[in-house]
């Protein structure tokens, strides 16, 4: 298995610095965060804990993605870092910008892009929402075929595919060459946990790559009736509920040789030290 980093978890560094550090530490690749670039100044709501999303310098500007794609490829090639995904926050209906990212993926030679399935909040019947996404995926699959890239949906809490089974139900009518799934055991601590091996075997060829992060539940108080209130919290890789060693064993048993993509939102270590220790840990448990 190869080990890379989703650049969302490197918010402190600019594009070339991100690649240089990954090379220096010995990572194999990068999954680029594609979205709105970090503002010139820290936003009013900035905190150290939310810097991943509000002030992330390691982000490819989606408005300029086709213009900068060649330069980004050149930087990564120069350091021997593989680009294995362009990871957006676009919905399946945002076809103009999805196509723009597909064009950039062709320029870069990147096989995957992420598109985000919608959240489920109960305001629309689940079956109706699911069917709308499945219908739109027909459009996305056609586009992916035109550009020969794979559109990946991520197993994610609070959206319509929080488990491997739900993800498989969505993608199973489509060609795994063009529609895939990002497996995410950290998200499944929040919602959607299933036996890892079951999910890996169920997804089969639809498994595109694997996000690596961890989380646990903490009691944060009591409600008006005296019942405990529990909420999920991000943790370092070694300290959460997701059994990453077992995950790696199950991936090996399935013959998986793709990327483990670190997406660590914990804050106990500075980013550089966290990257270093995470790589050492993952090398040890994935061999």
Image (spheres, rainbow, N blue to C red):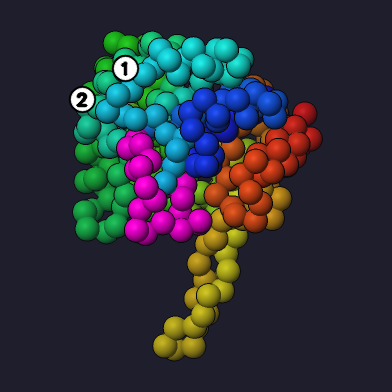
Q: Earlier in the sequence, mark 1 or mark 2?
A: 1
Residue 21, disc: none
- Foreground: 226 or 43? 43
Q: Between residue 19 and residue 143, name the one nearer to us.
A: 19
* Quarter where residue 64 is shown: top left
Quarter the N terminus occupies: top right
Instruction: Assign the magenta stretch its main secondary structure.
Output: loop
Residue at position x 53%, y 75% in the image: 220
Determine the residue positioned at 60% across, 60% down: 216
Callout 2 environment at 10 Å: few (<14), some (14 to 19), or many (20+)?
few
Residue 171 visible from this viewpoint: no
* Residue 177 pos. (x, y %): 42, 16
The reply to whether callout 1 and callout 2 are in contact (CB within 8 Å) is no
Left or right of 218? Residue 104 is: left
Which element is circle 1 on?
Answer: helix
* Residue 19 point in image, percent of width and height: 56, 25
Mark 1 lies on residue: 67
Q: Nearer the viewer, mark 1 or mark 2?
A: 1
**Residue at horizontal 44%, vertical 42%?**
56
Q: CA distance from mark 1 to mark 2?
A: 16 Å
Foreground residue among 22 and 255? 22
Residue 247 covered by magenta stretch: no
Residue 25, position as x, y percentages in the image: 70, 29
Q: Residue furthest bottom?
A: 225
Which residue in the structure is indicated by mark 2? 96
Which region is colored magenta? 35-54
Would residue 40 be counted in the magenta stretch?
yes
> Vertical placement of 235 versus 85: above or below?
below
Q: Position of residue 150 (x, y in %)?
A: 40, 20
Residue 137 quadrant: top left
In this rendering, the answer to whether 115 lies above or below 165 is: above
């Amino acid at each position: 298995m190869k080990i890379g980093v989703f650049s969302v978890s490197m918010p402190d560094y600019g594009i070339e610095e991100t690649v240089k550090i990954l090379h220096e530490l010995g990572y194999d690749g990068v999954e680029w965060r594609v979205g709105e670039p970090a503002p010139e100044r820290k936003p009013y709501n900035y905190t150290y804990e939310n810097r991943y999303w509000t002030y992330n310098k390691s982000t490819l500007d989606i408005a300029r993605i086709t213009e900068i794609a060649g330069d980004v490829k050149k930087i990564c090639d120069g350091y021997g870092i593989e680009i294995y995904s362009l990871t957006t926050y676009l919905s399946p209906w945002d076809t103009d910008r999805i196509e723009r990212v597909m064009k950039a993926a062709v320029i870069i030679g990147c096989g995957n892009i992420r598109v985000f399935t919608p959240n489920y909040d109960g305001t629309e019947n689940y079956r109706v929402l699911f069917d709308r996404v499945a219908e739109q995926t027909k459009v996305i699959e056609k586009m992916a075929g035109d550009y020969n890239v794979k559109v990946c949906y991520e197993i994610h809490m609070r959206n319509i595919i929080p488990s491997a089974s739900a993800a498989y139900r969505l993608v199973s009518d489509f060609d795994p060459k063009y529609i895939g799934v990002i497996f995410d055991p950290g998200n499944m601590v929040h919602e959607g946990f299933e036996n890892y091996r079951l999910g890996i075997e169920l997804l089969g060829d639809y498994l595109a790559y694997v996000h690596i992060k961890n989380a646990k539940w903490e009691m944060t108080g009591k409600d008006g009736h005296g019942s405990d209130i529990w909420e999920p919290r991000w943790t370092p890789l070694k300290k959460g509920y997701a059994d990453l060693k077992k995950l790696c064993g199950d991936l090996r048993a399935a013959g998986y040789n793709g990327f483990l993509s670190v997406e660590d939102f914990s804050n106990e270590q500075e980013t550089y030290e966290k990257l270093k220790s995470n790589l050492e840990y993952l090398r040890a448990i994935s061999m």
